[in-house]
Amino acid sequence: MRLRRGMGISRQAKYWVMLPVLLAGTASISATVKQGEALEAGRRAYENGDYAKAVLELQAAAAKEPQNGDIQLLLTKSYLELQERDAAITSAEKAVAIDPQSSVFHEWLGRAYGEKADHASLFTAPGLARKTHREFEIAVQLDEKNFAARQALIEFDCAAPGLVGGGEEKAKPEIAKLESMDAAEWHYALGNCRRQKKDFADADVEFQLALESHPKSAELIFDIGDYAVRRGQAERLMEVADLGTTVTAADPRGMFYRAVGFVLKNERQEEAERLLREYLQKAPKRTGYPRYAVAHEWLGRLHENKGEKESAVKEYQVALQLEPKNKSARESLKRVEKK
């Protein structure tokens, strides 16, 4: 901090006058640094996929800064990764209470309600779903360019019945607003709505147009990548990998989608294996990222294509160890063992 000189005070007198202020400032800076350190430690733990540690660090930071909504937001995200949905809702509600005008806080409160609704009973799920819809609506009202919130609202309307506030007719005006705002987001919304209705032919067309419209969102690009994996679309996966790397070069998901494209095309097998292994080393265990079990499953398919039965069996077994209910990996293992 740069201090301005006083007027009419000798250097020695000025020192004694200013000493209490300087000491108080030093203590304040020290406390701020410690608070910042706790938040940064929580953020690092979150980025590294250590969500339990992130929660501990962020709880300590929140105790020192109870009015910091960003801490509560990161706590919400960490709790969701730990599948502690009630705790996630509590943190998201605190964030909204701290700053009711934050579109992002309302968006994540909606996501927390939605996660709980997905795992709730038939009696409590409808109420939670309506809360989810309401929070997405508020998020969009507060910031019309919060595309993540608008896409969540559109997906809800396209997938959910009118009983809980959804309905495709409600989605149409929201989608239409995107046309003049962002072409990639508009085509993605159209495609995602068709995907919810299992109209895959139209979804294919819209997702391709989204990729050709210079998307800025890595999440949009990689979600189309996930769709392409499920549809076995090798060429689209290459496009997803290229675009994703352009938007966010450090994101390991580009490696995964490129590798799967190679496996589907049955070419460049050594590079495909290298990319999948590197993905497993670098990718966090996080929602929106291909799961480790799925990466091992594709490694199994790669070795199966090469006629390497033992290696394929090993990879499918690892996938099942990570996810015992993975039906696809189980069927693949049975198929290989019969050969």
Image (cartoon, grey):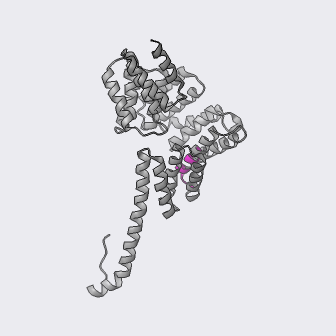
- Position of 138 relative to 11 (above/below): above
Determine whether, in the image, residue 192 is placed left or right of residue 161: left
Residue at x-position 49% and y-position 52% = 55
Left or right: 303, with 179 as reference point: left
Question: Where are the magenta residues, as a range?
Answer: 100-110
Quadrant in which the N terminus is drawn: bottom left
Q: Name the residue rendered at 36%, 21% in the picture.
A: 262
**Residue at 34% over, 18% down:** 267
Q: Residue 171 colored magenta? A: no
Relative to residue 153, is residue 290 drawn left or right? left
Residue drawn 48% across and 30% down? 321
Using the rendered view, name the quadrant where residue 162 is placed: top right
Q: Quadrant of residue 114?
A: top right
Does residue 50 sit above or below 332 in this rendering?
Answer: below
Residue 87 drawn above or below residue 21: above
Foreground of the two, 35 or 221? 35
Residue 299 visible? The answer is yes
Q: Quadrant of the C terminus?
A: top left
Residue 170, horizontal then vertical, whole percent = 64, 35
Q: Which residue is the extreme one toward the top?
A: 339
Name the residue furthest left: 11
Position of residue 88 measured from the top left corner of the image (x, y, whole percent): 57, 49
Magenta region includes residue 104:
yes
Is residue 8 visible in the rendered structure shown here? Answer: no
Judged by its main secondary structure, the magenta piece is helix
Where is residue 214 drawn, in percent x and y? Answer: 40, 33
Q: How many marks?
A: 0
